[in-house]
Amino acid sequence: MSNSSINKPPHRITDLINLIKNGEDITCDTMFEIVPVDFAHGNIEFQAYIFLCQYFGTIGSTNYIFRKCYARGCPNNLCPHVSQAVMIANRYLKRDYKKLLDAKIAVKENLFSLEDMLVKYDGIDLEKDEATGGILTIHDYINIAKEGNSVAVQIDLEIIPAVEHFANQRNEQTFLMVNFNIITLGKKSQFQRCLACFQTNNETKEKPVAIQTANERLKILFNEFDDTKIQYKPIFFN
């Protein structure tokens, strides 16, 4: 294994793909977490559920682990409903599995389960909230643009402090979020994606890495916007 791989552990699916292209031997496995999180957004405080996937394995003889947030669900109107968040998370997850498998990185294709969430968090209301625009993802709008339709996207970035609640501990975590406000086909839609996060109490070390990860993900997305003539103004975390 090369020194560069040791000094720069992977933080994204793309990092794993680039490493295997460079000749590294890679194993990959996943573990899911659905974590209740207290968010403080300006003067508004609310609880949501974050759908996380831990990616772990080996690069050569060296272990790695990183996590990716696939969706955020709320039992109110402040973000997509938890029932929709499961479907949104699984759609993004399937895209990442395809990328890994196309790169010849073997991974078992597990998915988030709404039933698992019901068992873990009994009493959650699962009525579908139509106001959040169904289960469309940003790539659905990219496909709408590919078909020749006008798509305009306003992008806002936020850095939001939060507290994750695990079985016997609280974890202060800061999330780098992107808000999409989209106009196409005579309709307006809005939704969010988490692009990266870091331990709040380790900001000095982890925030620069999280910002780099988030900005790299934005670059990939903006390239897709450019290819399909989506109207937008690029913006990055700094």
Image (cartoon, helix red, strand yellow):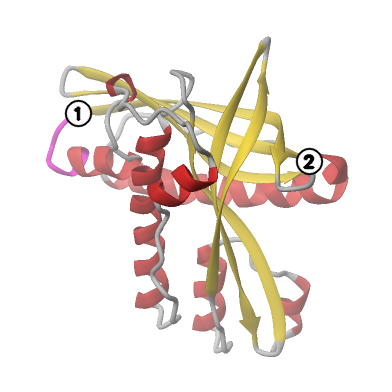
Write the residue at 28% across / 37% down: 136
Q: Which percent across, then down, holds residue 70? A: 48, 48
Q: Which percent across, then down, holds residue 30? A: 53, 68
Q: Is residue 234 above or below residue 132?
A: below
Residue 77 is left or right of residue 54, and the answer is: left
Write the residue at 34% across / 39% down: 138
Between 51 and 144, which is closer to the camera in this rendering? 51
Check the picture and name the quadrant holding the C terminus: top right
Q: CA distance from mark 2 to mark 1?
A: 45 Å
Q: Main SS of the magenta segment?
A: loop
Check the picture and name the quadrant holding the N terminus: bottom right
Mark carried by residue 50: none
Task: Provide the residue span drawn in magenta.
Answer: 145-149
Q: Amino acid at mark 2?
A: Arg
Say which element carries label 1. loop
Write the residue at 54% across / 46% down: 120
Q: Amino acid at mark 1?
A: Ser
Which residue bears the numbered disc 2? Answer: 170
Write the residue at 61% across / 27% down: 158
Q: Residues within 10 Å of mark 1 (few under 14, many from 20)?
A: some
**The quarter of the displayed image where residue 59 is located:** bottom right
Say which element carries label 2. strand
Q: Is residue 162 above or below residue 46?
A: below
Q: Residues within 10 Å of mark 2 (few under 14, many from 20)?
A: few
Q: Which percent across, then down, holds residue 167? A: 71, 48
Q: Which percent across, then down, holds residue 234? A: 48, 33
**The quarter of the displayed image where residue 62 is located:** bottom right
Marks 2 and 1, the one that precedes in the sequence:
1
Mark carried by residue 150: 1
Between 106 and 141, which is closer to the camera in this rendering? 106
Residue 110 is left or right of residue 140, and the answer is: right
Q: Would residue 165 be counted in the magenta stretch?
A: no
